[in-house]
Structure formats: C-alpha cells, structure tokens
Amino acid sequence: MNRLSDDSIRLKKDTYMSDPLFRELIPSLCMLERDYGEMNAVEVWLESDKVIEELKASSYPEYEVDIIYNSMYSDYETFNIDKKRNLTRTHADAVNSAVTVMTVLLLRLSDASNQSADECPHYEICRQIAQNIKEHNRADMLLKLFRVEEDHNELERGFVLPVTDYMADTGSKMDNLSKEENDRVGQVVSRIVDLTKSLLPKMDLNEQQYTSLWTDICCEEGAIEELNLREPRNQEWGNVKFVAGVLCLLQNTLVNPKDKIGKTFLKANQREIALALGRESLRNYVNLDYLSIDWQKIIKKKLNSFSQNSCK
C-alpha cells in the first residue's frame, strides 16, 4: 500500500472533515495510529472509500466482501513510504489494518438506516463484513471506542449522526475532491489529452470518453504526484513513462480490433505513441516495464470497468 504524502493528507482531510461520521471516528483512529502504528485516520477512510467503489461496481457486492478482505492482507503487508523506502510489516499487523478498514466500512454502510439492522439497505454486505471481523480484537476495540465517542457527543452535545447512504451514487469522483485537488486533476488531464489525442483514431474511444478515462485515473490516490514526475529526467511536461504505460495497457481493453489486424496496438503504433509524447526517441519508453505492477493492477481494473460502461 502506498502511504499518503503530507500534502495529500492535508487535502483529503479538508474534504473528509465535512463528514460527521469521519469526525466522530477521528479520536479512535488517531489512538490506533499513535499506540499501534496503524494507518492514520485519513488513510483508513480513503481505503474504505476504495472498497465502497469496488462494491458499487459489482453486481454481487455481498460476495465481493471476502475477496476484497483477503486481498487486503497482502496489500497491507508492505507500506510504501516513498519511491525509495518501504516498510515490511508482520502478517498480524496487516490483518489488523484490514480489520480496521473493514470495521470503518461496516460503520459507514450501517449508517444508511436508523432502523433495525435487517432493514438497512446494505444488510447482506454488513452481515458478510461482520462475519469476517467478529473474532478480531481490533474490531471489538475500535467499535467500543467509537461507541464511547458517539455516546459522549449525543449526551454532552446533543449531536446525533445523520443517516447517510455511502453506497448511493454521488456523481463524478471529482465532485468528492477539494477545489485544489480538482484544479490539479483538471490541469494534468488537459495536458495528457492534448498531447495524446492524435492517437484517438487508433482507439475505440471518442475524446470525451478518453478524457473521462484519464480523469478517473488521475483521481486515483498518488496518480497526480506520479504524473508530475519528470521521467525520463529531460522531459519538460511530466512522466512520459507512466502515460506510455497506460497507453500500452489500452491494447488489451479499448483498442479497436479492426485497426491493423494481426498487430497489437503497442507494436503497431509504438512510433506514433512516442511522437505524441514528444519525440520518436521516446519509443523505448513505450513499454509496460516502466509502469509498476501495483499501478498496472489499479489501471487494468479501471480500464476493464471503463470498457464495460463507456465504450461504443
């Protein structure tokens, strides 16, 4: 898992602070960070956001819970601090992180109703989450800490959490970003689309779809920082290697199969991709080897989802 930069934490926190449930969870999550080396409150909330997006994209979300929960174990066994520093964690710590995120997710989804549990619109998902975390001390600890804070706010301040359905359609991902994040995403997307839209005739996409795809990628945590790096170093505008890697992935998802039959998008258009990115000598960087495995997984998932929903 990639840890957030201080700047990203600041931007995300400014956005999340408008959510009453996030504010109520802050004392409990900060205690876990302080005493047990857990992710910070912003990172835990962001991880639960990612799970919500996966569940919303599935036709059978209750069956996705176990798969997502298991994948968290390996994701949280390594914390990527930055490009040069990684923290290897024990399996027990990784499990505790997964339980922490799932417990926050349970609280968020159960917040969709103030009626009995079985009347919650996400009852089956919540039941499956509870089955996974019920034997873990971390879940019990976090829930008790949260209930103490909730009771305090209700009794001392007269504040009751509003009903919120986090699985409801909230529109574009950019609607959930701060103004500063929105501006940064918009600038990077415009730059990439302007540089590479000459490749659109090679793809089964129009400009609006292509822009939407890059917007979705750029909203992924850490993508803007990655794209603003100058790779290779003599580039004027940003990370050619990253953009080229994404274009390489398009060969298996969104590329028009009628274009140059018998050749992949990459092999058939390597020179055109390099020219679009700046100059022909960049063709050596039109290679998936320059895109990390973690980013390949993230972007493949987005491309597959996008191709199902947005292609002609």
Image (cartoon, rainbow, N blue to C red):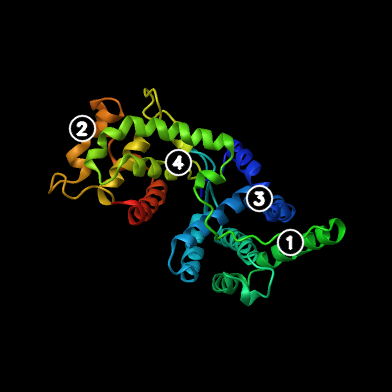
The tag earlier along the polypeptide, 2 or 1, is 1
Q: Gap in Å between the C-alphas at discs 4 and 1?
A: 33 Å
Amino acid type of disc 3? Ala
In this rendering, the label closer to the viewer, 2 or 4: 4
The tag earlier along the polypeptide, 3 or 2, is 3
In this rendering, the label closer to the viewer, 4 or 3: 4
Give SS at disc 1. Answer: helix
Amino acid type of disc 2? Arg
The tag earlier along the polypeptide, 4 or 3, is 3
Amino acid type of disc 1? Phe
Front residue (pair 234, 205): 205
- Residue plotted at (48% across, 45% down): 220
The image quarter in which residue 126 lies = bottom right
Q: Which residue is label 2 attached to?
A: 271
Q: Which residue is label 4 attached to?
A: 218
Q: Which residue is label 3 attached to?
A: 41
The tag earlier along the polypeptide, 4 or 1, is 1
- Residue plotted at (24% across, 26% down): 281
Q: Gap in Å between the C-alphas at discs 2 and 1?
A: 57 Å
Q: Gap in Å between the C-alphas at discs 1 and 3?
A: 13 Å
